[in-house]
Amino acid sequence: MEYTKPLTNKTLASPAANADALPGAAPIDAHIAARLKALRAERSLTLQDLAAGSGVSRAMISKIERAEASATAALLHKLCTALGISLSDLLAPAHSQPSAIMRRSQRMRWQDPATGFVRETVTPRIPRSQVEVVAVTLPPQATVQYGPSVAGDAAHPSALTSSGYGQHIIAQTDGLRITQHGALGQNTLTTDLMAGDALFMWAQERFAFENLLGTPCQYLVVIEHRP
C-alpha cells in the first residue's frame, strides 16, 4: 500500500466551512469554532458549563471558539461527548439538509494536529438513522488516545448528559492495537487486530488506537448512536 503525506487541515475543510472562515484562521479551525459556539448556545450552556461537563478548561474552549487553537481528537471527543453529539455532527456544514446519499466528493475529512491521523465521514447523517460509518488512517507507529468527558466519568458526576455510543472497529490492514481502560484506569484490555478482524466497544470508556507498524493503518468505525 502506498503512503502519501498526511493532508493539512487547510485542505480538509469543505467549501461551506471556507465561506465562514475567521481572518487568519485555517478554514477547518474556523468551521469548528463557529459550530462549537453555535451548538453550545443552542443548549444554553456557558463556557463554564461546558468546561465543567467536559473536563476541558474554559480558557481552551474559548480559544477553540475564537479559532486561536487547533483542537486535537482527544479534546474534541470530550467536548462532543459533553454536548451529546458525534464528531461528524460537529464537522458537518451548518444548516445542511439531511440527504440519504453522500457523494465521495462531499465527505468531510479532518486531520488530528497532534497525531496526523485522518478521519473521513463515509455515510450521511440522517435523523432517523442511529448509524454512521467513518474511515480512519492512522500514520505509522502513531497513537491517538481518548478519554471520557466529566459527564461520562462515573467518578465525576455532572449535570450534562452524555449520549454515549457503541462502535464497531473493522481493521482493513494489520497492526491495529486497541487499548480499553475501565473506570479509574482499572480492568485494562488490549486487543490486537489484523486485517478483517472486528471489535465492538463502548466509546465512553477510556481507550486508545495504536498503529504498531511502520506503514499506515486503516480501519472503519461503524458508530451506533443511542436514541
Image (cartoon, rainbow, N blue to C red):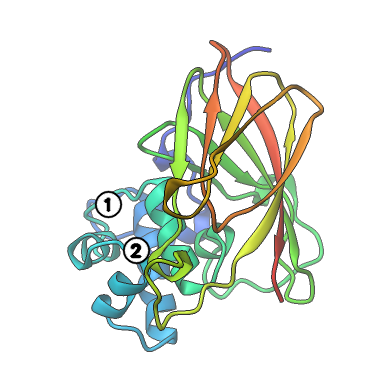
- In the depicted structure, whether residue 136 falls above or below residue 87: above
The residue depicted at 42 percent of the width and 69 percent of the height is 35
Query: Residue under circle 2?
Result: 33
**Tags 1 and 2 in contact by the CB under 8 Å rule?**
yes
- Outermost residue on the front side: it is 186
Q: Is residue 48 left or right of residue 122?
A: left
Q: Amino acid at mark 2?
A: Ala
Q: What residue is shown at x 74% (from left), y 70% (from top)? A: 126
Judged by depth in the image, the label closer to the viewer, 1 or 2, is: 2
Upstream in the sequence, badge 1 or badge 2?
Answer: 1
Q: Residues within 10 Å of mark 2 (few under 14, many from 20)?
A: many
Which numbered disc covers residue 25? 1
Task: Judge left or right: residue 79 versus residue 59.
Answer: right
Which residue is pictured at 41% across the width and 41% down the height? 9
Is the N terminus in the top left, top right, bottom left or bottom right quadrant? top right
Residue 168, compared with residue 213, is above or below; it is below
Residue type beneath disc 1: Ala
Residue 54, percent from left and from top: 36, 66
Q: Picture coordinates of residue 226 (x, y %)? A: 69, 71
Q: Quadrant of residue 4?
A: top right
Identify the image quadrant of the C terminus: bottom right
Distance Cα–Cα, label 1 vs label 2: 10 Å
Marker count (numbered): 2
Q: Nearer the viewer, residue 163 or 14?
A: 163
Q: Secondary structure at mark 1?
A: loop
